[in-house]
Amino acid sequence: MTAHLPLLEIKNLSKSYGAVKAVNDVSIHIDRGEIAGLIGPNGSGKSTFFDCSTGLAKPDAGTVVLDGQDITGWSLNRIAREGRMLRSFQKTVTFKSLDVEENLVIAGQMFTFPSIASTFGLGKMSRQRIEGLRERARELIKMAGLWDVRHQPAGNLSGGQQKLIQFASMLMPEPKLILLDEPMAGINPKIIERVVDTILYANKSLGVSLLVIEHNIDVVTSICRRVIVLDQGAKLVEGLPGDIIQDQRVREAYLGG
Ligand code: ADP
Ligand code: MG
């Protein structure tokens, strides 16, 4: 019934912190099956836009409609569980003392029994369901290039590998849409390729749509079909990656002109 609608439609979103208009009347949509990019200089409101779209912060104004359902004002947890829209943070979050496979299984489990997951652990789930999660976890671990380190504590691995664990964990609950906040920040070029491959796998093979904040413009132009540019909290322009990088307004925004 909602197949003809965009997967995500955000209208007139605004959020101020004191006198700072962090997000100022921004409207965007994400189509089903697409990878879109969100770029802009530091402080242009990209992370705040994610915060307000995913329930971490309440927008002052605007609406967020996901798959035909108005989710404005829903909590981060409810949007993740019921809306199946997930977000990552600039800072990587993993369970550092658990091994790679356990990190993924727990991520899958949290969305099955979100409120009791941490209290009762895996004991509350049927053996069959846990096996299903383990199978999915192993598939994702292979695809993310983490097979050889799957039994190591996440905390022992590099920052880039932890980003891969975080991203693979987000794929466990079969999301519709993932919002990634600077997935390539601070990781080495070899792992960048892995993260790109993992994002493309999620999109093409698992059917996940993505909105990605990213400063690495080569990554943006290679994975995104469409790019949206924020400047000083407002949408400056959107279009094809090739056109965006040529756009004089975008160049000036980045130069602070
Ligand atoms: P970006 O992710 O594009 O770098 P942010 O969304 O982090 O930009 O920030 C946009 C503006 O909002 C900045 O001026 C920032 O200082 C301000 N801001 C963001 N979050 C908060 C907050 N929790 N409290 C106060 N100001 C904030
Ligand atoms: Mg940010």
Image: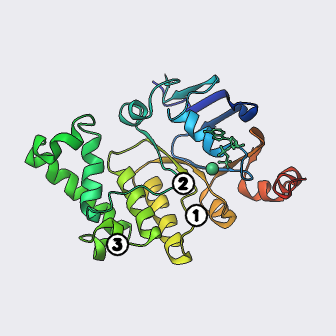
What residue is at 8 percent from the left and 48 percent from the top? 127
Q: Are marks 1 and 2 in contact (CB under 8 Å)?
A: yes
What residue is at 78 percent from the left and 42 percent from the top? 232
CA gap, disc 3 to disc 2? 20 Å
Residue 195 at what x, y percent from top left? 49, 65
Query: Which is nearer the eye, 229 or 7?
Result: 229
**What's under tag 2, amino acid-wise?**
Gln
Q: Which residue is mark 2?
A: 90
The mark nearer the N terminus, 1 or 3, is 3
User: Is the residue marked 3 within 8 Å of ligand 2, measured from its CB?
Assistant: no
Q: Which residue is mark 3?
A: 156
Q: Relative to residue 36, is residue 112 drawn left or right? A: left
Residue 212 at what x, y percent from top left? 58, 51
User: Is the residue marked 2 within 8 Å of ligand 2, measured from its CB?
Assistant: yes
Tell me which image quadrant ligand 1 sits in: top right
The mark nearer the N terminus, 3 or 2, is 2
Residue 222 at what x, y percent from top left? 63, 63
Q: Which residue is mark 1?
A: 185
Residue count near mark 3 (Cα–Cα under 10 Å), binned few <14, some 14–19, many ≥20 = some
Q: In the figure, 219 relative to 189: above or below?
A: above
Residue count near mark 2 (Cα–Cα under 10 Å), binned few <14, some 14–19, many ≥20 = some
**What's under tag 1, amino acid-wise?**
Ala
CA gap, disc 1 to disc 2? 8 Å
* Residue 18 visible in the snapshot: yes
CA gap, disc 1 to disc 3? 19 Å
What residue is at 23 percent from the left and 70 percent from the top? 151
Dot 2: element? loop
Residue 241 at what x, y percent from top left? 72, 56
What residue is at 51 percent from the left and 36 percent from the top? 54
Quarter of the image for residue 51 reads: top right
**What's under tag 3, amino acid-wise?**
Asn
